[in-house]
Image (cartoon, grey):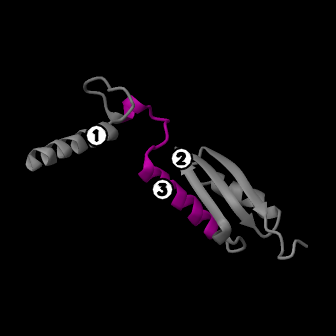
Amino acid sequence: MKTFRLAVGAALVATSLAAWSQSSEPASAPGATAMTASGSAAPATGRKANRALRRQVYNAIANHKEISAGNISVVAKDGAVTLSGTVTNASQVSTVAEIAKSVPGVISVTNKLTVEQPFGGQ
């Protein structure tokens, strides 16, 4: 009985993993390549592509020594980048957004950066 329960549990886990990993995109026509099925202008999707784009944007920002990238958060999803955190002066808010827009693969930038207030609010 214990072995039977274990086998049923393993079958349920395997079934739910297979269902979870299926794509929500419709199946392409036989013989069609992935590029033609998804369209050539579509950005790369998926967690791996999002992480790669996030790293590219963060590295581009970090290459500018006048900007303290340690207080900036970058989130990327399907080519849309969101910047949040703080910078040391107001001119850096737009500079960081322009740097992010210049990275290949970035389609849009949402800029939520703020200027860091000195300790004590002065």
The residue carrying mark 2 is 77
State how far apart marks 3 and 2 are (Cα): 9 Å
- The amino acid at mark 3 is Arg
State how far apart marks 1 and 2 are (Cα): 25 Å
| Res. 57 in view | yes
Residue 6 in the magenta stretch? The answer is: no
Q: Earlier in the sequence, mark 3 or mark 2?
A: 3
Q: Is residue 77 left or right of residue 25?
A: right
- The amino acid at mark 1 is Ser
Q: Residues within 10 Å of mark 1 (few under 14, many from 20)?
A: few
Q: Give the label on residue 58, or none.
A: none
The residue carrying mark 1 is 16
Asked if labels 2 and 3 touch by Cβ distance under 8 angstroms, the answer is no
Q: Residue 76: x, y in percent?
A: 55, 51
Please name the residue shown 78% across and 70% down the image.
88
Please name the residue shown 72% across and 53% down the image.
112
Q: Quadrant of the C terminus?
A: bottom right
Q: Is residue 16 left or right of residue 43?
A: left
Q: Residues within 10 Å of mark 3 (few under 14, many from 20)?
A: some
Q: Earlier in the sequence, mark 1 or mark 2?
A: 1
Please name the residue shown 38% across and 35% down the image.
35
Asked if labels 2 and 1 touch by Cβ distance under 8 angstroms, the answer is no
The residue carrying mark 3 is 51
Span of residues in magenta: 35-63
